[in-house]
Amino acid sequence: MSVAALRRQSKLYINKQVKITAKNGIIYTGKITKVDGKKLYLKVSSANDGKKVHTSFLPFVLPLVLFDLLVIALLETGPRRFI
């Protein structure tokens, strides 16, 4: 996926809870606060590389480079309703 496509997708999820998988396998969970140029700013709630889990009681904003990301998935915050 191109950087421009990731930027467009990222902007759709601003202020929403997301799960992001980086190319190196690290999974980040948090809210996207800003998308600027080639960087995405994520208010991190946790990161998982398979061995360590990082959790912060004081959320911090982590800048991620868009071309290092594989997947951005929206996490549902409430129950799903089917019509």
Image: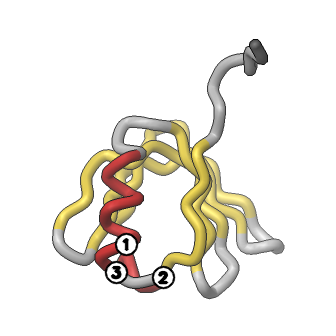
Q: Mark 3 points at which residue?
A: 3
As displayed, is residue 25 above or below residue 17?
below
State the SS at label 1: helix
- In what element is the residue under mark 3? helix
Residue 39 sits above or below residue 55 on the image: below
Q: Distance between the residues labelled 1 and 3?
A: 5 Å
Question: Which amino acid lies under the numbered mark 3 shown in the image of this protein?
Answer: Val
Report the residue marked by disc 1.
Answer: 5
Whether 8 is drawn above or below 29: the answer is below
In x, y percent, where is residue 38?
25, 77
Q: Residue at x 75, y 13 (%)?
A: 83
Near mark 2 (Cα within 10 A), the count class, few <14, some 14-19 or many ≥20, is few
**Residue depicted at x 71% and y 64%:** 48
The secondary element bearing badge 2 is classed as loop
- Residue at 37% x, 36% y is 15
Q: Is residue 74 left or right of residue 58?
A: right
Q: Quadrant of residue 47?
A: bottom right
Question: Decide: marks 2, 1 in contact (CB < 8 A)?
Answer: yes
